[in-house]
Amino acid sequence: MKRTFGLMLLGAWLILTGLTQLLHLSFAGMGTLKAILATASGILLLLGL
């Protein structure tokens, strides 16, 4: 099963989002980090990488 970078970034974003909600985790720049992960994974998925 081939895994792409886009799917791995999407998985990281989903885990980060889930943990922040479940464990009430927060730190400065959390929104920026999640936005970067979401954007990068979307671009890579559209490119098929």
Image (cartoon, rainbow, N blue to C red):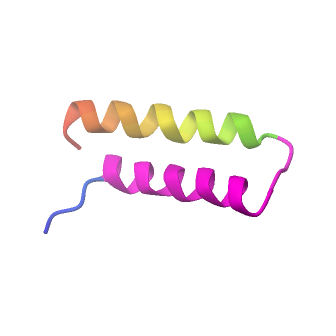
Q: Quadrant of the C terminus?
A: top left
Who's the residue at 19% across and 39% down the image?
48
Who's the residue at 32% across and 37% down the image?
44
Q: Is residue 32 left or right of residue 3?
A: right
Q: Quadrant of the N terminus?
A: bottom left
Q: Is residue 32 left or right of residue 48?
A: right
| Most distant residue in the bottom direction | 1
Give the answer, above or below, for where 46 lies relative to 13: above
Residue 35 x/y as whole percent: 60, 33
Residue 11 x/y as whole percent: 43, 56
Q: Specify the segment rendered in magenta.
A: 5-28
Who's the residue at 75% across and 43% down the image?
30
Give the answer, above or below, for where 9 lies relative to 22: above
Q: Nearer the viewer, residue 27 or 14?
A: 14
21 part of magenta stretch? yes
Q: Is residue 21 left or right of residue 14?
A: right
Q: How many marks?
A: 0
